[in-house]
Image (cartoon, rainbow, N blue to C red):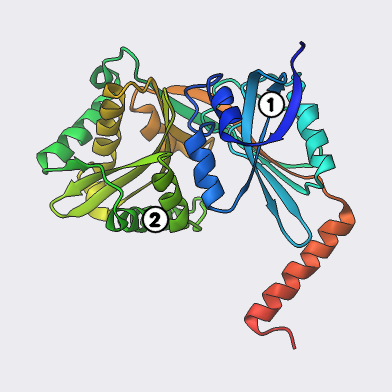
Amino acid sequence: MIPTFFAREADDRWIHLASATDPDNPFLVVTYLHAQRALGRESWLLGIGTESMVESAALCFMERGRVRRSLIVPSSPPVDTKSEFWPGLDGFCRKHGITDLDISTFATPASVIPAMRGETTRVRRTEYAMSLAGSDLWEKVSKSHRDRIKKGRKNGLVVRREATDAAIDAHVSLHMNSMDRRKLRGEDVSLEFERSTSAALLTSGAAQLFQAMLGDHVASSLLVLRSSKGAYSESSGNSTEGMNIGASHFLRYEAAVALQTEGIEMFYLGGAREHEEGLRAYKAGFGTIPIDTDAVTAYIGGSLRRGLSSAMETLHALTKTGGAR
């Protein structure tokens, strides 16, 4: 049977089949599906395959609003621009009345997103992948990063791995502190970060929390998604004191060492956009493999729905500020 595009509501059996095609990908595992379900997200598996086999696939999430309907693809499958996946995705969106399409390439090493119908933004970004299998990680790290790691050790940093309420609270707080600092530097970052997401990922087993402890407080925190062979840096944060003593460098290196001993072969440190030179240099300093890729958003609803949605958003904003009488 010739593989073709398929779309089915995600379940454990099909996610197990799909994950075998991309074992490095933590966005394509049952525990990640369970976390998203706990958050109330409608989950779909889209890909190329047959009635009993998956060739490549993406776990996607549908969000329904009053007027608009979104489809989020966190990690597009490793297919080329001529793959049947792309027209299949477009057909799925038409069938289900999707108005907003958001495609990312987290932990996707070989995907190129073609020009999409209604495309509104395309952001060039680079993923940084740290190959762990059979590697001497210390030798790969740059001299400046080694110095920062040594500084962290000298100052008494130790790694804690637990998911207590206090640990999650510290992670959320440090992440928001880091985003605030980046915002003040003029970077375009999101200041929305919900504790419920981190808690759901940890509760389902989709993620683990690594934290650099300085005495009894957290100097750096890192939430890592896991699959059978891969890991992904989902979110992180650092205290000001932690930044001064190399806590971020120390924690990522020690996390990589721990993941390596546990059989993880690829550790994705996340991405950086073209203009984020400091972030790019930081992630490259761990001896990573740069993977150039895109993130695409598209509006594929009709003009009437866009106008109605805009009017409702304006009315809602006016109501909240007391502007509507």
Whether 281 is drawn above or below 307: the answer is above
Using the rendered image of the protein, determine whether residue 325 is visible from the camera's viewpoint: yes
Task: Provide residue 323's location: percent of width, then percent of height.
Answer: 70, 83
Residue depicted at x 54% and y 26%: 16
Left or right for 192, reference 112: left
**Element class at badge 2:** helix
For disc 1, the neighbor class at 10 Å (few under 14, some 14 to 19, many from 20) is many
Whether 132 is drawn above or below 126: the answer is above
Quarter of the picture holding the N terminus = top right
Task: Provide residue 69's location: percent of width, then percent of height.
Answer: 74, 52
Task: Provide residue 35's location: percent of width, then percent of height.
Answer: 49, 45
Whether 138 is drawn above or below 197: the answer is above
Q: Are marks 1 and 2 in contact (CB under 8 Å)?
A: no
Mark on residue 124? none
Q: Residue furthest bottom?
A: 325
Q: Nearer the viewer, residue 223 or 241?
A: 223
Q: Reading the chain from its start, which is encountered first: label 1 or label 2?
A: 1
For disc 2, the neighbor class at 10 Å (few under 14, some 14 to 19, many from 20) is few
Using the rendered image of the protein, determine whether residue 144 is visible from the camera's viewpoint: no
Q: Quadrant of residue 308?
A: bottom right
Closer mark to the observer between disc 1 and disc 2:
1
Query: Which amino acid does the dot numbered 2 rest on?
Result: Arg
Q: Quadrant of residue 314?
A: bottom right
Residue depicted at x 30% and y 35%: 252
Residue depicted at x 36% and y 23%: 264
Query: Which amino acid does the dot numbered 1 rest on?
Result: Gly
Q: Name the residue tied to disc 2.
A: 181
Quarter of the picture holding the C terminus = bottom right
Q: Name the residue tied to disc 1.
A: 47
Task: Provide residue 134's location: percent of width, then percent of height.
Answer: 31, 12
**Element class at badge 1:** strand
Left or right for 225, reference 316: left
